[in-house]
Amino acid sequence: MRGPGSPAAPFSRMNGPPAPAGPENALYPLAMNRSLDDFVAEAGLGASPEKIAAAGKRLTLPGPLALDCGVSLPEVTIAYETYGTLNAERSNAILVCHALTSDQYCAGTNPLNGKPGWWHLLIGPGRPVDTDQYFVICANVIGGCMGTTGPVSIDPATGAPYGLSFPVITIADMVRAQAAFLDALGIGDLFCVLGGSMGGMQVLQWAAAYPERVFAAIPIAAAARHSAQNIAFHEVGRQAIRADLDWRGGDYLKHGTTPKKGLAVARMAAHITYLSEAALHRKFGRKLQDRETVAYGFDADFQIESYLRHQGITFVDRFDANSYLYITRAMDYFDLAADHGGSLAKAFPGIKTRFCVVSFTSDWLYPTSESRTVVHALNAVAAKVSFLEIVTDRGHDAFLLDEPEMFATLSGFLGSAARERGLAPK
Amino acid sequence: MTVIAQAPALRADLRLVARMVTDGARVLDVGCGDGDLLAYLVATNNVDGRGIELSQTGVNACVRRGLAVIQGDADLDLGDYPSDAFDFVILSQTIQATRAPEQVLSNMLRIGRRVIVSIPNFGHWQVRLKLLVHGRMPMTRALADPWYTTPNIHLCTIRDFLDLAQTLGASMERAIAVDRRGHPHDVGDRALFANLFGVEGVFLLSRN
């Protein structure tokens, strides 16, 4: 049994709805003093493949998709969602790129769980990304598990799920797939490409690969390459998954198992990197979970342990382990400077796109220095770039949360870009 | 580039600065505040403008009015700009608050073909008189904070600044002293006089 009531999680999950702006000191209400095994024993797939398949919009690319690894994917389906209306000139489209474990349901209500879309605070009618004005498109990345072709998809050559026979993909492949998808939708130029974390990497890749198609670009809490530390944390997660016997060498779908424990541990480790020491201290400190004193055992004595176990196990409900391997790998391979002879500036020669780069003071996963590297490269090519570092103690996850300064900046940036684009009166 | 919020009436020293900027130039405004000068230059001189501003609220205000401004610091961030990136680099009423004014100025001369700097003049007769008569750190309209909260850690006079420009090998194309009533006077060969009656100095320099 899950804990009572709907948990008012003190932090947002990477993909879940951001934490409600409730009292900052609200305790995590779940009866969480249970082992990970209890949880995984009960966990079922929150959204079954059938449910995912039945929900939302699909588009099959007209041709095969050539990948960086040299392989070509013969058949690619893109699962996507749209919000707002495309204008007659087709000039008001905004592509939203999602993060590692997110999905295409960035606004409105996620039909799979009935919760608000993961960026509903930013995107919607009257929001900074106003869907009364803009046509917002969000597509599940290739390699994902929310309907777009990925390791859970059926390989047309074998009639069985790809599993580990799915080719290794890159951020550039994700963006290439999105470009082909937009071509198929009949959308040439984008008014804006917007994304946080891995979504921000895709934004940078978009600007580098298709600068003429991108009028404005907003990479948030992102980096132009994955650092050794970033790769290290991902490797911990991947090893946790692979160490789970239920992973079965990646063939768990064939065997009817799920590497729940491994995936939950991967998520727990990753989740720490989305927060900050200050926020953890503020929320949890050394507070105990449902007890007055430590139990001299290995139950979840501390609230932070309960919280992480909860994060791990709810993740298992909605994410595929092999997808996690593939997408983290794509992020690790990302190095925009290396792709351009070692100089990041060379990724953006003569670019006309206007940029708004945003970072957060307490983000140690993609720290401000990474955003500054991007800004310096853009300055070197005389690009129109604005940059703001937002003061917050909420860590990397801040980009998903209620950050008024971020909303004000994005709203102002988009408003002025819209006037330049002729989308709004001058 | 279109700027919606038209610049309000510009401060006297900023009007002088604006007159020195040629039409269509590439301009970097260091410490651009809410973007008043940049917005004015974009609207009237049709410049391709960029800004650097330390405060979050300043950056936000700029971004909202369509200006390309990055959050940064004259001391730390100028070093990362490529040489000759701009026609004009502007630093108004800020150099006295930087940690390394000499380095800031030489960076500006490297980044831009021309540099415009305005300073509050510590050589103004009121400042001198206050120190002489009261024996305390002078506080004036231009220097309104007490010594223990002022951001101005490297105050100088008009003559001091002329010396620094010379030390760095820059040519002084124009030097203007603005008096108490906001009237500009060419410093020319009357530096002693300008240093006494100028509340602020505005300088146009170029690299030799």
Image: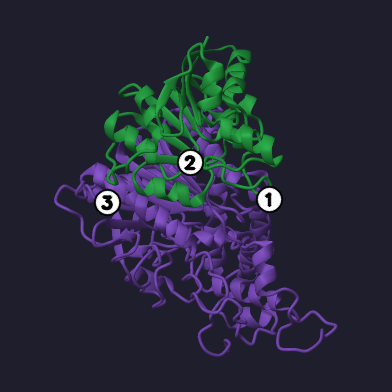
Chain colours: A purple, B green
A123, A77: nearer the viewer: A123
Q: Residue at x 34, y 44 (%)?
A: B66
Q: Is residue B199 visible?
A: yes
Question: Comparing marks 3 and 1, which lies closer to the viewer?
Answer: 3
Query: Is residue B23 found left or right of B53 in the rendered image?
Result: left
How far, Cα to Cα, is label 2 from label 3?
Answer: 26 Å
User: How busy is the neighbourhood of tag 2: few (under 14 within 10 Å), some, or many (20 plus)?
Assistant: many
Question: Of callouts 3 and 1, which one flags the residue occurring earlier in the amino acid sequence?
Answer: 3
In the rendered image, which quarter contains the N terminus of chain B?
top left
Q: In which chain is the residue bearing label 1?
A: A
Residue beneath disc 3? A93
Q: Amino acid at mark 1?
A: Ala
Q: Is residue A298 above or below residue A238?
A: below
Asked whether A348 or B85 is in front, the reply is: B85
Residue A184 at x, y percent in the picture: 25, 48
Q: Position of residue A189 (x, y in %)?
A: 26, 42
Q: Chain of mark 2?
A: B
